[in-house]
Image (cartoon, rainbow, N blue to C red):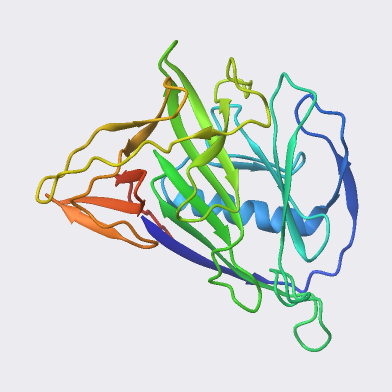
Amino acid sequence: MYYRKYFEGGPITSSETVKVTFGACSAQYNVLIEQSRIIGHAVEEVLCDAGMNAYYDDEHFILYPNREEKLGIGIFKQALGTISYVVFACDDIANVFNTSSSSGGSGYQPFNVTTGADYGKYKFYITVIGEPKGWLRVHVGTYNNPANMSYGFGIGYGKDIRDNRRVGYFVINPGYNTTSFYVRRTDDGSLVDGIAYSETVKFSAAAVTGQTNTLVLINIYDTHGYLTMDNCYLGCSALTAGTNNFYIINGVEYYYPNVNMLIKCISKVSVTG
């Protein structure tokens, strides 16, 4: 899946803020209310287009990729030139906090704060690439370059084979070659046993080699040995990996961004209205 949607509106002149906490952590973040909600609901809309049951809680500034689960990520703006993300757990006093900071001044972010006719307006794209039922990158474009794919987050799903509990993976500002992710349980947002809140799990097993005309599908696993990711497989030397490398094989779409991860794309975009 490779899908992009455009958002524009405004002007937005409000600078009202509120202090917000996430999970069990007492750290407070100063959140721009209206701007945060615009970004959060745009991400929610695109994920729903991509087939996810997403929900953005604009009271607590948390995106739930699946509204029936408690796994969420904080998405908000603290300043006009940044978008902030918090990966949190229900059972830990610390959060993983990251800020996407767009270089080049105020014009390089979704809200244009320069003077003139466009003062306070917003123009941006939300781009998703990958598989919503596997591994998906979500990028927020910038005002002067709305198709930009440098800033955003990634969300993935799999399971802990020790107890078959479903887990979710997050990372901030992922690239096509990113293979290390934070992990949480999806049913309650808790930490996975043996993995600290700030520790990442690595899906870096070597690709299957020696194959030139045969696609070999071996389920991907992390270096701990007990975490998997849905619809994701070890790389295969029969294919060439690359930033936007998609293949149709026997009528099935695959995305092969890097040699450690071959993603089977089973979801379809659905846009109504």
In the current view of this chain or complex, which residue is farthest to the left? Answer: 213
State the residue at coordinates (30%, 38%). Answer: 234
* Image: 194 above or below 157: above
In the current view of this chain or complex, which residue is farthest to the bottom? Answer: 116
Q: Which percent across, then down, holds residue 61? A: 73, 43
Q: Which percent across, then down, holds residue 151? A: 61, 60
Of 267 and 192, which appears nearest the observer?
192
113 vs 195, left or right, is: right
Image quarter hosting the N terminus? bottom left
In the current view of this chain or complex, which residue is farthest to the top? Answer: 163
State the residue at coordinates (60%, 76%). Answer: 145
How many marks do you count on the picture? 0
Q: Which percent across, then down, holds residue 194? A: 59, 16
State the residue at coordinates (42%, 61%). Answer: 3
Hey, which quadrant is residue 227 in on the image? top left
230 vs 73, left or right, is: left
24 vs 39, left or right, is: right
187 vs 165, left or right, is: right
Image quarter hosting the C terminus? bottom left
Q: Which percent across, then down, holds residue 214? A: 11, 45
* Image: 197 above or below 209: above
